[in-house]
Amino acid sequence: MEPRSRAGCVRSLDRHGEEFVAVMTDETPVTAPKVILATGIVDEKPNLPGMREFIYRGRVRFCPICDGYEAMDQHIAVIGLFKPALKKAIFLRTYSRRVTLLLMADVGPSKQDLRLLQEADVELRRAPVVDLLEQNDHVKAVLADGTSLVPDVLYPAMGCRVRSDLALPLGASHDDLGSLLTGGDQLTSVPGLYAIGDITTELHQLSVSVGQAAIAATHIHNHLPRNDR
């Protein structure tokens, strides 16, 4: 059988017996015995005018594991809710001596959290951010106490939306965020349904996604009927 391809968006995914049925947005059904989901995540972004341009210029970044080295020795600010922002700020101290933690809400850190900040030498601005503006080529954070900060790089730590909507109605196991749980072969808890990339709970890296794709594709190939030429 010759391979088939179809471009478009999938509106829903259902399972009928041994087959999956993906319904496209134009209502066209596509059937397959196996499905690989690689729908990823959507990072939550600050409400900042010109966000796309700031990302393009490297003033706003999201993954320090991916590109933290490009912010080496710059003034880095992390903005978000306290717990995730704290974790990212401490991680970024690997790349710069000057890291500032900015809060989206007025939070009283615990003594343990303050000790972690002190040990990592991360500056904490307690007044929450009330606005983000453009100042020349940089992002300017305006705080509730009237002060402001203009870092070289801004890392949001505001969470993300996991795009696992197609898998959850099928009963796929997932964590609290909606990330799909898979085994070593990238199979979810739904037979024949695989998940790779950021939609899983593994490290969100392109190299990880490519490796997972190879694992899933090989497992599928080995469990499909022979298709000799």
Image (cartoon, rainbow, N blue to C red):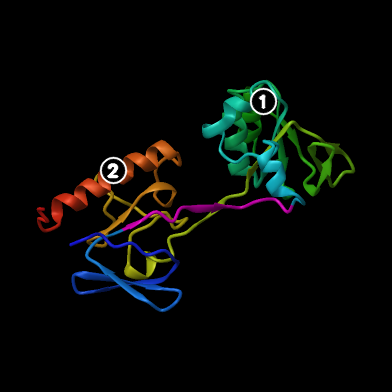
Q: What residue is shown with label 1?
A: 118
Residue 190 location, x and y as percent? Answer: 26, 62
Q: Which residue is at 68% across, 48% downward?
A: 52
Provide the residue span drawn in magenta: 36-47
Q: Residue furthest bottom?
A: 27
Within 10 Å of the Cα at label 1, are there few (<14), some (14-19), or many (20+) other Cα atoms? few
Contact, CB < 8 Å: mark 2 with mark 1? no
Q: Is residue 89 magenta?
A: no
Q: Which dot, 2 or 1, sits closer to the camera?
A: 2
Q: Which residue is at 65% across, 29% downward?
A: 117
Q: Amino acid at mark 1?
A: Gln
Tell me how many marks there are: 2
**Left or right: 75 in relation to 135:** left
Regarding mark 2 in the picture, which secondary structure is present there?
A: helix
Q: Which residue is at 22% across, 70% downward?
A: 19
CA distance separating discs 2 and 1: 43 Å
> Which disc is residue 214 wearing?
2
Q: Quadrant of residue 12?
A: bottom left
* Above or below for 115 versus 167: above
Among the two numbered marks 2 and 1 on one chain, the one whose residue lies closer to the N terminus:
1
Q: Amino acid at mark 2?
A: Ala
Residue 82 location, x and y as percent? Answer: 65, 44
